[in-house]
Amino acid sequence: MYNFIEFLITSISANIVYMAIPLILLSVVVSAVHLDKKGVPVILVALFAGIIFGGDGLKLWQFSDMNLTNKLANLALVFVLFHGGFCTKKENLKQVALPAIGLASWGVVLTAIFTFVCLHFILGWDRNLSILLSVIISSTDAAAIFSILRKQSLKSKLSSTIEIESAANDPMAVLLTLIAVQALASDASTSLYSFVVEFLWKFLAGPAIGFFIAKFVVNLINRLTPQENSYYYIILLCTAMFTYGFTEAVNASGILAVFTAGIAMGNMQFVHKQGVYNFSSAISTISNILLFVLLGVLVSPHNWLKEGLILKGVLLFALLSFVARPAAVFLGTIGMKLQFKDRFFIAWSGLRGAVPIVLATYPIAYNLDNGMEIFNLVFFAVLLSLIVQGASLGKIASLLKLSSPSRPEPPYSLEFFTKNDMEMGQKITVFTVDLPAPEGCKGPLIRDLKLPENTLLLMITRRKKVPILFRRTQKILSLLNQNTMKHGEEAKMLVDKAQEIIMEINEKRYFHSGENEEEYDVWQVLPPRGDTVLYGWDQITVLAKVEDEEKVRDALLKAFENVTIKEGLHRFADTDSNF
């Protein structure tokens, strides 16, 4: 009996990772589903889950290998940043290129400089500690910003600036951290000339390598056109990993190369692009959650009390959020025609997240003396940033009157797995086009669109707001219909009569008299026909040749250029036969 118990304990210990990780991830998903409505980002949920289940909590999973964490974190960041680039559209990039790229480059440098000045010259902290903290925590986090602002969308230019900056500034922070860590670890006085040469090589060679690899891969996909859909996903994994590995091997910036490769592929046309996007999104989400869970398991909050790091962490967060970041934003955007409230919001939206915590493992990996102190300080400051800034972003956007109703996500979508005609050389793909705002702006008939030949519109997804009483009457009718069979023909006649009365009431819009009446979303999937009218915020699913994707998007979007907001909203009140 004793031997059996010993064997059972040994077996459970050997497989604890296989049991612990699924339980932790499942708890993250269950919690995130409920907390998402309150604006709590999933990465914060994952972080707390790691802390709760880790060594300072339930001890379900104890992990303390910093070097392994550094390697796993780099792998996760490869996929997170690749997808961040994949989602960056060239139209948005052109619109806000100067402020977004400026904040992502010299904005990061200015943030690091102001943070260093405050820490070293004002607070009197150690020079090496101040340098490392300044460069490590200088970048913002895209995942946190996207998650929190999803329901409080901003005007187009402002939201694009914040999103592109948050996705593009990580490489600069990684670059500065690597240079600082390597310089301090080698105890060598690097000359200014060497520093500039190394910086330029990393900053310029990385994007060039990423672009050419992406170009090669897209051409390869369009030539091969695999019939097995999973092959596309393997190619995506190989592209992201090889781009990073090869670029690092030639001493350039692998992070910049991966991000650039993502941008390039995301703005090129290739077979099965929608499926590749979905897979990239899934891998990015999984990597982000696993990364934060791992970081949560790794940290030991009890050390904050023992080493007195809480006060230092609060000071680091306060100086960064109230001094360094605002100073960098206001100084770095001079002459860019941004209003004061826009700059203020950009400054406050500088949430810290995964990248600073990952970079905080670098000093430990390089065996620097203050490595563990840096990790705990950065972790605590990031935690404060997610809680304080993350919880208030939506409210501040509303107070500054910067937010507007966001484009809703349809509860369903259509995904085709296209099989290409190898003999005819036909390369086709399925993609979606989101028609522009404002919602309900009446556009053209489908038959009036100038679409490329052999283009097929598969599905139109549209939302309509209906009052709460309409929603309740629909529920009543549903319940009555469910019970009709139990009570015979007489009950069916009563239900039919009730339905006639309710429909008449709704048609006369008796329920629309209250301006503050609560409304619900009702979604419809419409079959595209020649006489179907398109409206703003419709989502169109299209089947077309790969080379025609850009032409299709232009045809659909340009059809709305001459439609005014006033006219569109007025026409939306008319009853449409397709809705």
Image (spheres, rainbow, N blue to C red):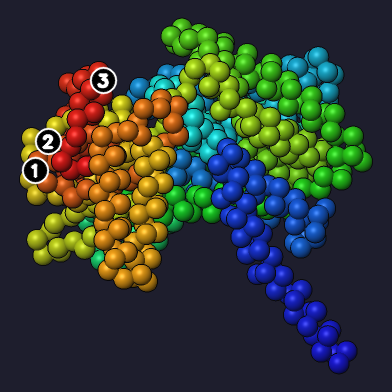
Q: Position of 445 compared to 412: left or right?
A: left
Marks 2,1: beta carbons within 8 A: yes
- The residue carrying mark 1 is 530
Q: How far apart are marks 2 and 1 (CA)?
A: 7 Å
Return the residue nearer the eye: 302 or 109. Answer: 302
Residue 400 point in image, percent of width and height: 53, 16
Q: Residue furthest top?
A: 335
- Secondary structure of the residue carrying tag 3 is helix
Return the residue nearer the eye: 272 or 474. Answer: 474
Return the residue nearer the eye: 415 or 522. Answer: 522
Mark before the other along the chain sequence, 2 or 1: 2
Question: Is residue 375 among what the camera can see?
Answer: yes
Question: Tag on residue 445?
Answer: 2
Q: Position of 93 compared to 202: left or right?
A: left
On-image quarter of the C terminus: top left
Question: Tag on residue 341?
Answer: none
Residue in view at x 9 percent, y 41 percent: 531
Mark before the other along the chain sequence, 3 or 1: 1
On-image quarter of the N terminus: bottom right
Question: Tag on residue 565?
Answer: 3
Name which quarter of the figure residue 170 lies in.
top right
Name which quarter of the figure residue 549 lies in.
top left
- Secondary structure of the residue carrying tag 2 is strand
- Residue 323 versus residue 445 in the image, above or below: above
Mark before the other along the chain sequence, 3 or 2: 2
The residue type indicated by label 1 comes to Gly
Q: Position of 436 compared to 383: left or right?
A: left
Residue 190 point in image, percent of width and height: 67, 27
Residue 318 point in image, percent of width and height: 74, 22
Q: Distance between the residues labelled 3 and 2?
A: 17 Å
